Image: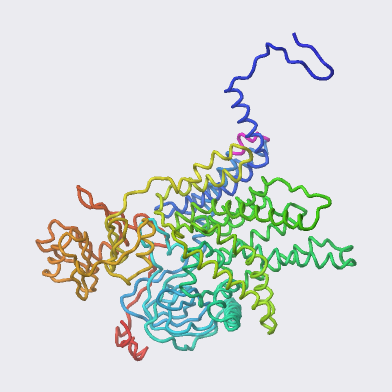
Amino acid sequence: MGGVSGRAALIPPDAAKPSPRERIAAWFLDEVRAQSLRWRLLAPVAFGAGAALYFALKREPPLWPLLGLAGATLAIWLGARWRGIGRRVTLPLMLLACLACGLAGAKVRSDRVAAPIAPAMAEPTVIEGWVVDVDSPGDRGHRVVVAPVRVQGLLPEATPIRLRATVRGEPPVPGSAIRLFAILNPPPPPASPGAYDFGRGAWFDRLGGTAFALGETRTAELPPAPWSLRMAMRVNAMRFALARRIVDRLGERTGGIAAAMTTGHETWIQREDLDAMRDSGLAHILSISGLHMAIVGGFAFFLVRFGVAGWPWLALRVSGKKVAAVAGLIAVWSYLVLSGAPAPAERSAITASIAFAAILLDRQAISMHGLAVAAMVVLILQPEAIVTPGFQMSFAATAALVALAEAWPPRTRELSVPWPIALFQSARHWLVIAVSASFVAGAATGPFAIQHFNRTAVFGLIANLATSPIADFIMMPALALGALLEPVGLGGPFLWVAGKGVDAMLFVGHRVAALPGAVRTIASAPDYVLPISFLGVLFVCLWQGRLRWAGLPFVCAVLIWPRDPTPTVWIGDGGTNAAYSVDGQAVVVRPGVRDFATELWSRRRGLTRAERDDAGWVCERYACAPRSGLAPVALWWGKAAPDAAALAGLCASAPLVSVRATVSALPDACADRLVLDSVDYARGGAVELWQTPQGWRAVWSADARGDRPWSRPGQGLRPFRDDKADLDAAEPGASDTGG
C-alpha cells in the first residue's frame, strides 16, 4: 500500500513495470510527438516527389487531368482544415495535395518553355543570329549561345529560340551578329540508356539545337534584336569583358580560374587544372552556387554590419542587422547577374534571399523551415530542378549542415582566459567545426556524386579543409572587391590577392589529385535506388531524435545496392562508335571519336577506358572488324551501306555487326548474326547489349527516355532551294572545309 513522503508519491513495491514492448511503444510515441513542428517540412518533399513522378513517366500526360487532380486534392485538404479535422487526416491530405501540385506544376512548366527543336539536317546549312553569351568550351573548340534569326532550310516558326554553336578560333563577343556555315542537329540524347538526358536540360533552357561550324565565323547584317535580347547581350558583354580583364591581370592559368568563379566563363580554364580540381574534390568551387553566394552575401552582411556598429550615430537610429541584410540581398542578386544567372546560382540566390528576408522579419536566418521555404520556391519556379544533380546535391548538403547546426551543442565561453589559450581553443573549435561540416556535407552529397558522376574523390575532405580558409576568407572576398572595382581600374591589388589564393588552391588540388588512389570509379546503381538514398538523407536531416539514425542504411543504398551485370557491348547514338567490356575495361573500337560519350558510358558502368589492340583488328576507311573470336562487335561507320561482300566479311568476324547506314538485304553469312543499322539507331538511339546463351538482350536509350517533348525533333524542315549549289553560293569556299 503506497504512502506519501513530503511531496513525492511512493511507488509501491508491487507496482507493475512496463514491458519492453510498452517501453519501445512509449519511446516511439515520444519520437513522433517531438516532430509536431516538423511535419510541414514534408511539403516540399511531397511537391518534389510529384515533379519527379512527372519526369519518370514514359509518355507525356495531358494537362487538364493533372490540373483537375491538383485542384481537387487542394480543395479536400483545405476543406478538412476548415472543418477542424485533426492532423492525422489533414497531414496525409496535405502531402497528397503537394504531390499532385508538383506533378501538375512540372507539366505546366514544360508546356510554358516549349520551343522548336532543330531536326537533324542532312546537309550543312547557313545560320545567322546574335551571340547571346559565351558558353563553356567543348572538346572541339569554343562554344557560344546563339539567338538565330535565320536558319537556311527551316521555316521561321520551326527555328529554335537558342542554339549552342561550336566555333573555330576565338569566340565572338556577346552582342555580335554572326553568320555560320555549320552542321545543325537537335540536342544530344542520352549517351547510354538511363544516363543523364542532355536534351531534357536543353528543353528547359530553351536550347533547340547544337551547331558545329565548318568554316570561320563571319559578320552578318541582321535586323535590330528585341529589347530584352539587347539587354541580355549587353549584360553578358559586360561580364565577358570583365572576365577578359581578370585574365589579362592574372594570366590565362590563374585568371581563367578566377574568371570562372566571378563571371561563370570557363573559356580559359586549362584541361589539366580542371581534371585536378575534379580528382581532388574541389571542382564545386568552380561552379557558382551555394558556396559562392554564401561567401559573397555573408561578406557583404558582416562588412556592412561592422560599419554600422562603428558609427555610433547611425547605430543608435537603425538596426545594423537589418541594414546588413539588405546589403546582403543586394550583393547576392548583383552577383547573380554578374555570374550570368546559371540555374545553380539562381537556386542559391533564392535560398540566400530567404535567409536574409528572415532577418528582416525577425526570424531565425538559418533554420530547416527557411530551407524548406527556399526548396518550395525553387521547385515551384523550376520543377525540373528535382532531377538535376546540382539541386539534389545542393539541398542535401544544406539540409545536412542545418541539421548539424541544430544538433551542435552551444559553446561555453570562459569569462577570463589568457589570449594564447583562447586562441588555441578558438582554433580547435574552428577545426572541429570545419572537419564536421566537410564530413557531413560530403556524406550527404556522396550518393548523388556516385550515381551521377561515378567518381569519388577519396581525399576530398583533406583538399577542402586545406583550401576552405583560403577560399572563404581570402580568395572570394578579394574577387568580389576586385570585380567591383576593376571596371574603374582599381581592382588590381584585390585581384592580385585573389590570384595568390587561386595559385594556392591549384597547388593543393594538383598535389591531392596526384596521390595514389585519389579517385575511385563506382558504377551507377539502378535508377530506382537514388530516390531511396535521397529519402534516407532527408529523414536523417529532418527527423528530430535518435530514430533519425534508422535512415542511415537508406542513405548508403547507392553504395551497397547490387549492380546490374555489365553490358557486353555499347554502341553510341547513330552507330558511329562502339565499345565492349573485358576484365573491367571498356575497349573502344574508334578511339578519339565521341570520346565524351564513351567516357560517360564507361564511368557509368564502373569501367576504365582502354583502346583496342591494333594487331587484333582489321580496319579500313569505313570499317573495323576483329579477328575471329577476339571481340564481340564489328563496326561500319560509312554513310553508304557496305556491299554484300563487305557485310559478309563483317558478319564472319563477330556475332554482332553495327552498320551506320541502312541495310536492305543480308547475305547468308549474316544469318546467325545480329545486325543493327540506321533504322534501329533512328528509333532507339544508343544501345547496351548483353550476350546470353539465349541470344542478345538489348536496352535502348529511347525506351528508357520515353516519348516526351524533349525527345521529339522539331518539324518545319523544307528542301534547300538549290541543294548544294545554293550552299556554296551562300558560303564561298565552305564546300572545301567540310560537308
Q: Which residue lies furthest to the top in this view?
A: 1
Magenta region's main secondary structure? Answer: helix
Q: Residue furthest left?
A: 668
The stretch drawn in magenta includes residue 97: no
Looking at the picture, does residue 160 appear above or below residue 459? below
Q: In front here: 737 or 271? A: 271
Q: Quadrant of the C terminus?
A: bottom left
Looking at the picture, does residue 488 appear above or below residue 135? below
The stretch drawn in magenta includes residue 89: yes
Q: Quadrant of the N terminus?
A: top right
Seen at 61% across and 34% down, the residue is 88
Give left or right: position of 243 versus 211.
right
Would residue 355 be visible to someone looking at this image?
yes
Q: Where is residue 293 in the image (x, y as percent from the top left)?
A: 64, 64
Looking at the picture, does residue 715 appear above or below residue 670? below
Q: Colour scheme used in the picture?
A: rainbow
Seen at 61% across and 39% down, the residue is 91
Q: Position of residue 571 (x, y in %)?
A: 29, 62
Q: What's the magenta region?
A: 84-91
Looking at the picture, does residue 230 appear above or below residue 371? below
Occupied quadrant, residue 282: bottom right
Occupied quadrant, residue 673: bottom left
Q: In front here: 152 or 252? A: 252
Give left or right: position of 164 versus 19.
left
Would residue 706 be visible to someone looking at this image?
no
Q: Where is residue 350 in the image (x, y as percent from the top left)?
A: 64, 60
Q: Where is residue 484 in the image (x, y as percent from the top left)?
A: 68, 77
